Amino acid sequence: MKKTRAPDLTEERIKVVIDILDGWTGKLTWDLLLDAVEEASGVRYSRFTFAEYAEIANAFSLKKDALRGTWKGEPSQPRDERVRAALEQAARYKAKVERLEKENQLLLEQFVTWATNAERKGVTMAMLNAPLPKPERDRTKRVK
């Protein structure tokens, strides 16, 4: 029996994977992530598919770094379900903020590289910062 191919990763599916990573606690491996994504979406992807998408690969790597050496089993959980849910949501938001800050730093580094390379080729910052031309929305183009 031939295996069916998993559907392409859309922006929505990538967001699901990253949201899972943001809320991740405990040991993290590609196989555990693949299992969690399959449970959430009903689709089994491969590690190689996820590694091809920079957003997922970066989020995985950053989460792995954040978890490294800190996991020693599940912490004791409050008995009140509302408190537990609020703490879990706060942990997800904190993880998301940390990931976004690191991604922002990577983008800033990339911008500096681009700006430096552009300047070396004679493109000035003024040229790069020039406003884009406004689209001609009011005029209907007529073909003659």
Image (cartoon, grey):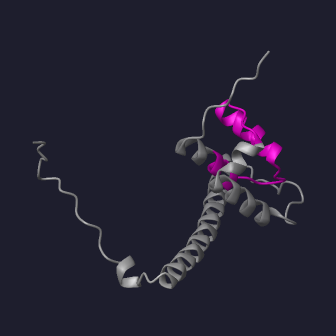
In the rendered structure, does residue 23 fall within the stretch colored magenta?
A: yes
Closer to us: 16 or 7: 7
Q: Is residue 41 above or below residue 75?
A: above
The quarter of the image holding the N terminus is top right
Q: Which quarter of the picture shows residue 126?
A: bottom left
Position of residue 115 measured from the top left corner of the image (x, y, whole percent) = 50, 80
Position of residue 127 measured from the top left corner of the image (x, y, whole percent) = 36, 79
Q: Which quarter of the picture shows residue 70?
A: bottom right
In the displayed structure, does residue 64 sit left or right of residue 126? right
The quarter of the image holding the C terminus is top left
Q: Residue furthest front?
A: 144
Residue at position x 72%, y 33% from top? 44
Query: Is residue 88 visible in the rendered structure shown here?
Result: no
Residue at position x 68%, y 60% from top? 58
What stretch of residues is rendered in magenta?
Answer: 17-46
In the displayed structure, does residue 65 sit left or right of residue 105? right
Q: Residue furthest right?
A: 72
In the rendered structure, does residue 87 fall within the stretch colored magenta?
A: no
Q: Is residue 118 above or below residue 144?
A: below
Position of residue 86 measured from the top left corner of the image (x, y, whole percent) = 62, 54
